[in-house]
Protein backbone atom coordinates (compact mmCIF):
# COMPACT_ATOMS: atom_id res chain seq x y z
CA UNK A 1 0.00 0.00 0.00
CA UNK A 2 2.86 2.35 0.82
CA UNK A 3 4.42 1.68 -2.60
CA UNK A 4 1.24 2.80 -4.35
CA UNK A 5 1.25 6.09 -2.43
CA UNK A 6 4.87 6.72 -3.42
CA UNK A 7 4.10 6.01 -7.09
CA UNK A 8 1.08 8.32 -7.03
CA UNK A 9 3.09 11.11 -5.40
CA UNK A 10 5.90 10.71 -7.95
CA UNK A 11 3.42 10.79 -10.84
CA UNK A 12 1.73 13.91 -9.47
CA UNK A 13 5.09 15.67 -9.06
CA UNK A 14 6.21 14.72 -12.59
CA UNK A 15 2.93 15.92 -14.11
CA UNK A 16 3.18 19.20 -12.18
CA UNK A 17 6.75 19.76 -13.37
CA UNK A 18 5.78 19.03 -16.98
CA UNK A 19 2.92 21.51 -16.70
CA UNK A 20 5.30 24.17 -15.36
CA UNK A 21 7.72 23.46 -18.21
CA UNK A 22 4.96 23.93 -20.79
CA UNK A 23 3.85 27.21 -19.21
CA UNK A 24 7.45 28.43 -19.03
CA UNK A 25 8.06 27.47 -22.66
CA UNK A 26 4.96 29.38 -23.82
CA UNK A 27 6.05 32.42 -21.81
CA UNK A 28 9.54 32.37 -23.33
CA UNK A 29 8.13 32.00 -26.84
CA UNK A 30 5.82 34.96 -26.30
CA UNK A 31 8.71 37.11 -25.02
CA UNK A 32 10.83 36.18 -28.05
CA UNK A 33 7.99 37.16 -30.40
CA UNK A 34 7.61 40.52 -28.63
CA UNK A 35 11.35 41.20 -28.88
CA UNK A 36 11.32 40.33 -32.58
CA UNK A 37 8.36 42.66 -33.13
CA UNK A 38 10.23 45.49 -31.36
CA UNK A 39 13.29 44.90 -33.55
CA UNK A 40 11.14 45.10 -36.67
CA UNK A 41 9.64 48.40 -35.48
CA UNK A 42 13.10 49.83 -34.81
CA UNK A 43 14.24 48.86 -38.30
CA UNK A 44 11.26 50.63 -39.85
CA UNK A 45 11.89 53.81 -37.84
CA UNK A 46 15.42 54.32 -39.17
CA UNK A 47 15.52 57.22 -41.62
CA UNK A 48 17.20 56.80 -44.92
CA UNK A 49 19.95 59.26 -45.66
CA UNK A 50 19.27 61.55 -48.58
CA UNK A 51 21.56 60.99 -51.49
CA UNK A 52 23.40 64.08 -52.55
CA UNK A 53 22.78 64.97 -56.14
CA UNK A 54 25.57 65.75 -58.53
CA UNK A 55 24.32 69.32 -58.81
CA UNK A 56 24.65 69.84 -55.06
CA UNK A 57 28.14 68.34 -55.10
CA UNK A 58 29.17 70.56 -58.00
CA UNK A 59 27.83 73.63 -56.19
CA UNK A 60 29.95 72.77 -53.16
CA UNK A 61 33.04 72.41 -55.30
CA UNK A 62 32.33 75.77 -56.96
CA UNK A 63 31.91 77.39 -53.53
CA UNK A 64 35.25 75.97 -52.40
CA UNK A 65 36.98 77.28 -55.49
CA UNK A 66 35.41 80.73 -55.01
CA UNK A 67 36.56 80.84 -51.38
CA UNK A 68 40.15 80.18 -52.38
Image: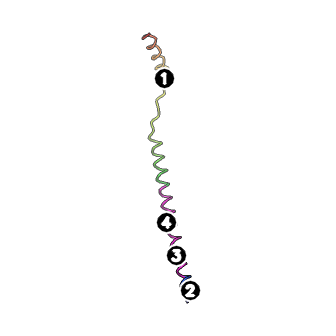
Query: Where does label 3 land, which residue?
Result: 13
- Residue 29 spot, x, y in % from top left: 51, 58
CA–CA distance between discs 4 and 1?
56 Å
**Neighbours of disc 3 within 10 Å: few (<14), some (14-19), many (20+):** few
Query: Where does label 2 land, which residue?
Result: 4
Position above or below: 22 against 55 = below
SS under mark 2 = helix
CA–CA distance between discs 1 and 3?
70 Å
Q: Nearer the viewer, mark 1 or mark 2?
A: 2
Q: Nearer the viewer, mark 2 or mark 4?
A: 2
Position above or below: 1 against 38 = below
Say which quadrant the C terminus sits in.
top left
**Neighbours of disc 1 within 10 Å: few (<14), some (14-19), many (20+):** few
Position above or below: 49 against 53 = below
**First reached walking from the N terminus: tag 4 or tag 3:** 3
Query: Where does label 1 land, which residue?
Result: 53
Residue 22: say if magenta. Answer: yes
Viewer-closest of 17 and 23: 17
SS under mark 1 = loop
Q: Nearer the viewer, mark 4 or mark 3?
A: 3
**Neighbours of disc 4 within 10 Å: few (<14), some (14-19), many (20+):** few
> Quick check: marks 4 and 3 in contact, CB under 8 Å?
no
Residue 16: say if magenta. Answer: yes
CA–CA distance between discs 2 and 4?
29 Å
- Residue 3 spot, x, y in % from top left: 57, 86
Question: Residue 23 has which mark?
Answer: 4
> Quick check: marks 2 and 3 in contact, CB under 8 Å?
no
CA–CA distance between discs 2 and 3?
14 Å
Magenta span main SS: helix
* Residues in magenta, as a range: 8-31
Say which quadrant the N terminus sits in.
bottom right
Amino acid sequence: MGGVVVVVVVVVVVVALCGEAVVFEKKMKKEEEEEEEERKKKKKKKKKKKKKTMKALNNREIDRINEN
